[in-house]
Image (cartoon, grey):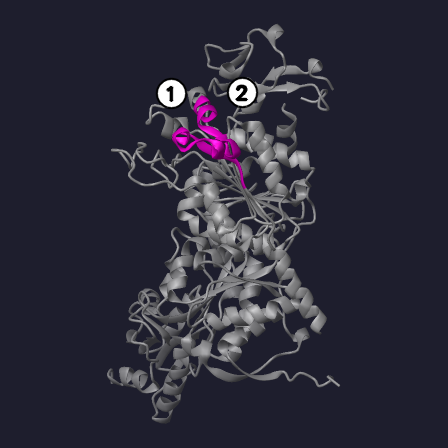
Amino acid sequence: MNKYVKKYLRNDKLAHMWCPGCGHGIIMHQIIKAIDNLGLDKDNICVVSGIGCSSRAPGYMDFDTLHTTHGRALAFATGIKLANPDMKVIVVSGDGDASAIGGNHLIHACRRNIDITTIVFNNTIYGMTGGQFSPTTATNDLASTAPYGSIDRPFDIAKLAAAAGASYSARSTVYHANNLEKLIEEALQVKGFSLVEAMSMCPTSYGRRNKKGTVSDMLEDYKETYININAFNKLPLEKREGKIEMGVFKNETYPEYTAEYQKIIDRLKGDK
Amino acid sequence: MKMKMKSNVQFVQGNKACILGALDAGYKFYGGYPITPSTELAELSAVELPKVGGKFIQMEDEIAGIAAAIGASLTGKKSMTATSGPGFSLKQENIGYAMMAEIPLVIVNVQRGGPSTGLPTSPAQGDMMQAKWGTHGDHPVIALTPESVQETYYMTIRAFNLAEKYRMPVMLMTDEVIGHMREKIVIPNKEDIEIIDRVQPNEKEGYLPYGVKDGETVPKMASFGDGYRYHVTGLAHDETGFPSNSNENAKRLLDRLMNKVNHNLDDILDYEEYMLEDAEHIVLSYGATARSARAAIKQMRQEGIKAGMFRLKTVWPFPEERLLELSKNVKNVLVAEMNLGQMVLEVERVVKDNAKILFCGRADGEIITPEEIVETLKEEF
Amino acid sequence: MSRENLVLKVKPEWCKGCGICVHFCPKNVLELDEDNKIVIARPDDCIKCGLCELRCPDFAIYLEGDENEDEK
């Protein structure tokens, strides 16, 4: 068995419940590789999720794991982290979970800059409920609730997090799995709020309806579409059409929430 | 010299008494959102918690407030969230989560006039049925209703104790009157207060986070970060904590959850019987309204009317056996509450034809006066 | 441990037959059988690049042979 799987996943719970070709398993794989690279203590990691396909990941991961209510993972995680700042707290979330029902929690976790790493499994669709459009579904894409093409404009989650005040924000895809692993590893080392948006294909509820071909075709699309942000920024405007940036959008140091709170506690101790 | 002994007699409002009680119970985490008339609970927590190494966080909304408190409780910290009407509505889904995942938590609802934004600065007792039925699905409920500032102090401690003992959210259903009223309270000596902490496991090997052994009421609860590496979910789950779709298992889980309360009524139920020995008329009330009921009874007794009070201290579970017994010996059971008829439904269910059921309620933001209660009863004579 | 000593292995019970590993194998080593399960059809051609393992969503194919060699 894959050594990371053996060490970090609850093997008796596998095979997982995701559909054939779903990219989520690839993301989960990169998360545990990144954890291993950093030598983090398994007993001191907590993985929190909300509701949706992505949110089943913690059930497979051999840490303290919390499968919460839809959209609220970051709010639960904030309580865990503030109550026990020594824990490494990781949130896994889908695009709907993180940016629709949980959108408010996302921007406020970024604003507080609390030391939580969030991995958004972005498949641009509500997969578990059968393919309704999400806040990241591209305009004109088809969904069960956008039968004539979506007229909604999508969020760019990585940029949203950066603008909302996160210390670290990055994006990669499951095609670029090695890069994704590296970005997650970087995010886990940030002292502050870090977010990695991982683009992941949903062949069942998105690909089929939008005639995206096979799962492998969808991966090839990622290869064609996503280019490094620095290369993207050097492209003349007309060549940016159809391309999407990936890589690190932001990496800055700000005061971290739990550390700032500890300063208050220490100050009050001094006043006694 | 700062050697002056801190007086254990204080003159405080109900919301402050709640925080004093909470701190004496070992309260360490507040997650919430400002809302009238519960805001003082947040403000006082913000002042006091960091002094005892605890944590306060003002979250972005009511839902996040309870979510953060549940998260903190999972790390072993005694946690609270506080709110009023609209916020109580918003918290309902996560109340159900804490019930299902069996996470100790105290939820204080300082009730105000509703529905909707209603009367933010006026008292009400309009969330009693919401406390019982607000979140979806079947689940047990413990909800306490203090009548005074002093009782708010004790009931807050009791709320934490029950939450820890039965691994579930416990609701303290006060109201704007009790929350903002100032009264003298006496803070007991620490050694005179019984404090209950959740039972934690001491053996990682074979730990079943949702398994109970013979004689255990609730599963032992490991804290996140202690190396038990277990799974918590709001999905129906088996003893291991992992989701299970089996009907048999879902039944077993729900039975166990319900029986935490149903099989421990002797421990949980709390009520006061005031001048009921020879009573021909029961006034059933709770919270701030019970103060008017008490005054009404004193007045009626002076007039020779044999009235007494059955005061609910736990509205949920409802003390139905005792009420049924009492109702067999009286003519009338008058329910007085600041709503348009909530706990009276429960009284009707229990009392049936044993006595005539009268109702004295209002939901216009004014408290019920003793005179109104007296009048309601006298209409029957 | 050098790559040459790694052994390509499959865990067919976890394979869901998505075909990603087959598509991205640079040496055309892999195939899906009639049950839509992964098989190592041409093991001698394998260059142990690990691309199959990298993108397998199901942890059903992997290179084994480092510190976990004697475990299964």
On the question of residue B160 being in view, the answer is: yes
Q: Which residue is mark 1?
A: A213
Work out whether residue A130 or residue A217 is closer to the camera in this orientation and state it: A217
Q: Is residue A85 above or below residue B8?
A: above
The answer to whether mark 2 and mark 1 are in CB contact below 8 A is: no
**Viewer-nearest of labels 2 and 1?**
1
Location of residue B330 by image quarter: bottom left
Please, what secondary structure does the residue beneath circle 2 have?
helix
Range of residues picked out in magenta: A220-249
- Identity of the residue drawn at 52% across and 34% down: A230
Q: Which residue is mark 2?
A: C13
Q: Is residue B353 above or below residue A230?
A: below
Which amino acid is tagged 2? Glu
- The outermost residue toward the bottom is B302
Q: Residue A142: where, in percent of width, then height? A: 30, 32
Q: Residue C24: where, in percent of width, then height? A: 51, 16
